[in-house]
Image: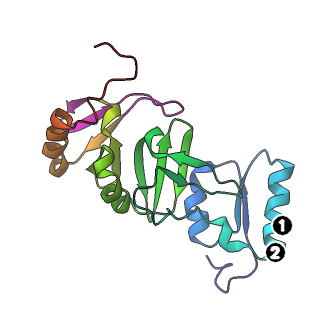
Amino acid sequence: RAIQANGEPAVVFVTAHDDKAVAAFDVGAIDYLLKPIRQNRLDEAVRRISSGAAQSSEPAAAPDDQDSDVLPAELGGITPLVPRDSIGWVEAEGDYARLHSATGAHLVRIPLSTLETRWRDHGFQRIHRSYLVSLRLVTGLRTSAGAVLVRMRANGASPAVELPVSRRQARELRDRLVRDPLRNLKPAGSDE
């Protein structure tokens, strides 16, 4: 933070720790390289510094189109388009959201509350101040030591997980699990 106080010099983090990227971009990092460093990623970081393209180093903002079926998740010069229907759950990380999808975890610069509003009619439910889940991947609820946990089925690169459900959200989650028509869609070719 002290180094970036005046916006100079340009800072590129080079580390083996992938869990600090959000904090790095919050303090104005140009790029975040993971070890072992690939030559093309190093070249891209140097290009950004020399061209003054610091603004492109942040994760992409979500498009303004509220019904967008994909979210761009730019980081380090690569912009994968993450289909909404591949996302199993979303985790809040400050002003960012980490999308846990069939292709891995992707960071976008959009608050969880915005995704909650936009995706509610597409089968997503807020279960906690830090989590939004796709109802179609919920396999059940479990109570442990008075806390409610939602069980999520594995989704491609995202493993099966259990996420906490706040008391405030538990009833609405139970109601939607029972009545949400998107959960009850049969896969194509199903005779059941």
Residue 144 picture quarter:
top left
Q: Position of residue 8 (x, y in %)?
A: 73, 82
Where is 103 relative to 69, above or below? Answer: above
Q: Residue at the spot x=79%, y=62% of the render? A: 45
Question: Looking at the image, which residue sits at the far top?
Answer: 191
Closest to the observer: 10 or 98?
A: 98
Where is 3 relative to 56, above or below? Answer: below
Residue 146 visible in rendering: no
Task: Name the residue tied to disc 1.
Answer: 47
Q: Secondary structure at mark 1?
A: helix
Q: Position of residue 161 (x, y in %)?
A: 39, 33
Q: Position of residue 29 (x, y in %)?
A: 67, 69
Task: Name the residue tied to disc 2.
Answer: 51
Classify 10 Å Cα crowding around label 2: few (below 14), some (14-19), many (20 and above). Answer: few
Residue 153: in magenta span: yes
Residue 142: in magenta span: yes
> Marks 2 and 1, how far apart in space?
6 Å
Q: Position of residue 168 (x, y in %)?
A: 16, 52
